[in-house]
Amino acid sequence: MSGRRVAAVIGDPVRHSRSPAIHNAAFSAAGIDWVFTAFEVPAGRGAEALEAMRVLGLAGMSVTMPLKAEVAAAADTVDAEVEILAAANCIVPLGDGRLHAANTDAAGFVAGLRADAGLSPEGLRVALLGGGGAARAVAWGLAAAGAADVAVINRTGSRAEAAASIANAASRSGRPGRVGTMEDMAAADLVVNATSVGMGSDASMPCDPTLLRPGQVAVDLVYEPIETAWLAALREHGVEAHNGLSMLVYQAAAAFELWTGIDAPVEAMRQAAVGGL
């Protein structure tokens, strides 16, 4: 197909999404005639959005809340992690009318961890705060990349168990996932906040920063504000701490490569993400 290609993000709400700025910067840097936009699609209309993608010939689609489970169920084929997570954030047209569902959040987190902290998950002991979709994606990514221990800490035991089971399903050796407690934070090499605590104007913290110590690495998946109260407190305490911006950028980069088949211009995408904050 010649001429301009169109890709989009769907969700509700979606006006706040950084995806158009990030992907349009990537298309420009890569020198390809693509454009990225946003469509607000309410819950319950995910399958219809995929059918519209076919009809309109969209070249790629990003998916955010509350549609990740709906599109995962409606796609023609899915990646292994989509099947386990029951959530997709990226739809790729296969060229024969079929649509493939992928989840780039797990790979995005691992790539961001390597970029920000120079840290490989292999052999790591991890304390993971949260039990929602973000926590499950992180659990999958860390376990698939060889983390030795993924202790999931959540006030709701069933959610912690679900995230831990996903880590076990992703692991190629052993069963690293388990339900953890705050006591696991002291022994962890890596502590991840995968809750929404601290987002926006919320100045509360997901846990007491003094539970961590110098020598540990912490990642807060929140990226707006760019420095949460928890990140600031951890840095004052001597802990190496990073926000979730790199996960945002690298999950988008993985989607870009699935759609276009070319290497993502990650630095251009990062600059666009930072510029919008």
Image (tube, rainbow, N blue to C red):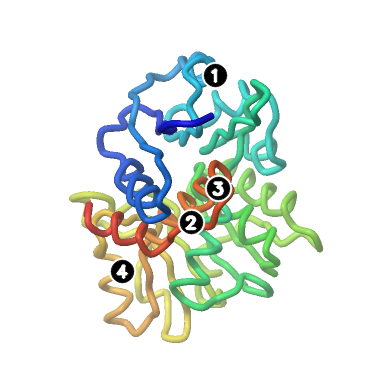
Spatial distance from mark 1 to mark 2, Cα to Cα? 24 Å
Q: Which residue does the image show at 67% across and 47% down from the upper left? A: 166
On screen, residue 99 above or below 198: above
Q: Nearer the viewer, mark 1 or mark 3?
A: 1
In the rendered image, the vertical position of residue 58 relative to residue 64, given as above or below: above
- Give the image location of residue 66, x and y in percent: 43, 28
Tag 2 and tag 4, C-beta contact below 8 Å:
no
Q: Identify the amino acid type marked 2.
A: Ala
- N-term-proximal mark, 4 vs 1: 1
Image quadrant where one finds the N terminus: top right
- Sequence-wise, the earlier of marks 1 and 2 is 1
What element does badge 1 sit on? helix
Query: Which secondary structure, mark 4?
Result: helix
Whether pointer 2 and pointer 3 mark residues with C-beta atoms closer than 8 Å, the reply is no
Give the Cα distance between marks 1 and 3: 21 Å
Could you say where residue 28 lies in the image, as x and y percent from the top left?
A: 35, 50
Viewer-proximal residue, 118 or 56? 56
Task: Rate crowding at label 3 as few (under 14), some (14 to 19) or many (20 or more) other CA atoms within 10 Å.
Answer: many
User: Mark 2 Cα within 10 Å, few/some/many (few <14, many 20+)?
Assistant: many
The amino acid pointed to by label 1 is: Arg
Q: Nearer the viewer, residue 121 or 130?
A: 121
Residue placed under numbered mark 2 in the picture: 264
Farthest residue, direction left: 201
Q: Is residue 205 above or below residue 158?
A: below
Instruction: Name which of mark 3 and mark 4 comes first in the sequence.
Output: 3
**Residue visible at 25% across and 65% down in the picture:** 227
Which sits earlier in the primary sequence, circle 2 or circle 3? 3
Q: Which tag, 2 or 4, sits closer to the chain's start? A: 4
For this view, does 185 lie left or right of residue 162?
left
- The label shown at residue 231 is 4
Instruction: Give the residue at mark 3.
Output: 104
